[in-house]
Image: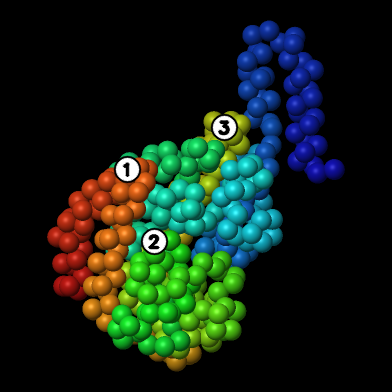
Amino acid sequence: MNMQFLKTFVISLFLVVFISGCGDNKEELNQQIVESKTYKWKLVTSWPKNFPGLGMAPEKFAEYVNEMSGGRLTVQVYGAGELVPGFEVFDAVSQGTAQMGHSGSYYWKGKIPSSPLFGAIPFGMTATELNAWLHYGGGLELWQEMYKPFGIIPMAGGNSGAQFAGWFKKEIQSMDDLKGLKMRIPGLAGEVLQRAGAVPVTLTGGEIYSSLQSGAIDGTEWVGPYNDLAFGFYQAATYYYSSIWHEPGTGLEFLINEKALKELPKDLQKIVEVAARAVNESTLDEYNARNNAALQTLVEKHNVQMRKLPPEVISELKEITAQVMAEQAANDEGFAKVWASYSAFHDSIKSYHDLTLKEYFMHR
């Protein structure tokens, strides 16, 4: 028998036996029973188990929660496909198959049209800007409102920072080179590329390399140097495009079953919240620290050919993005509501960063 379980059982039994005769101490003993109870959660993810960055975010969360709760709440992490497929994380949490999930919000666009706005959209906010909107600009409250009908409470779960345009088997020199191109790319960026003539394909991380190698796809975006090096994409594609347009600051998410969270004592609920917030910051820090060294390895050791998208391609993609966003807002009330908040905050913080950071980057 598990020693922690035995200890908890003995304490609880003792308290139950004596609680009826304790008079004024009844409330205190009830609280002790609550505090002695342990909880075990399952956390399913859309990433390979222990994958750098993305996959380690839920592992860190589990570690933080276990330590801060003194073992009262333990979280078992399952990689994509171990308990449920990577694209079924949302349903697993909504249905209570798992108490938590870790994924990217744009994967649920078919269920919640506004969901990509909480992760990353083409030509949208950077990581720090997105976090500012979520936590101090009303974004988190809107996020929770959109997910509430599904019994899920979302929380920010890390950010990969600005993501590279991706890997291609041929050079992209004009918009004509996008026509017929089969590319792994999710969310609204996929719709933008589709209108540009490309063929967007949605794949989980574990499916990308084999699809690129076999020719099932002609290109892929994933994250950036740190993760792309780990997946070995340099062995399957020649050109690596650094131009940032589709995901300037990709926010990840923790999905929490609302009923499961409310069943926890208040202090454990707060631990879940604080641990998620800590992981959100830690993950971005890790990407910022690791990406450049990984890029140097790709270029110097593996002779990766770095490229940038032509200005006219960027300009055309930006124009198409504006059309897509306007149509999304016109077609869905929830999207329109979130987009209004997102856009207002984006315009404001962009003006400030143009005045400050943009000028500084030019000077240094």
**Residue 346, percent across and down?**
25, 53
What's the amino acid at mark 1? Lys
The dot on residue 337 is 1
Quarter of the picture containing the N terminus is top right
**Residue 313, percent across and down?**
27, 77
Report the residue at 39% width, 61% height from top: 188
What's the amino acid at mark 2? Leu
Compared to 298, does 118 lie above or below?
A: above
Ranked by sequence position, the earlier of labels 3 and 1 is: 3
Contact between marks 3 and 2 (CB within 8 A): the answer is no
Crowd band around label 1 with a 10 angstrom C-alpha radius: few (<14), some (14–19), many (20+):
few
Residue found at the very far right of the displayed protein:
1
* Residue where numbered disc 2 is placed: 188
Report the residue at 79% width, 17% height from top: 17
Crowd band around label 2 with a 10 angstrom C-alpha radius: few (<14), some (14–19), many (20+):
many
Disc 1 is placed on an element classified as helix
Report the residue at 36% width, 84% height from top: 177
**Residue 295, percent across and down?**
42, 80
60 sits to left or right of 350: right
Cα separation, mark 3 vs mark 1, equals 27 Å
Crowd band around label 3 with a 10 angstrom C-alpha radius: few (<14), some (14–19), many (20+):
few
The dot on residue 53 is none
Contact between marks 2 and 1 (CB within 8 A): the answer is no
Of 97 and 52, the residue lying toward us:
97
Disc 3 is placed on an element classified as helix
Q: Nearer the viewer, mark 3 or mark 2?
A: 2
Compared to 66, does 21 lie above or below?
A: above
* Residue where numbered disc 3 is placed: 262
Of 322 and 45, the residue lying toward us:
322
Cα separation, mark 3 vs mark 2, equals 33 Å
What's the amino acid at mark 3? Lys
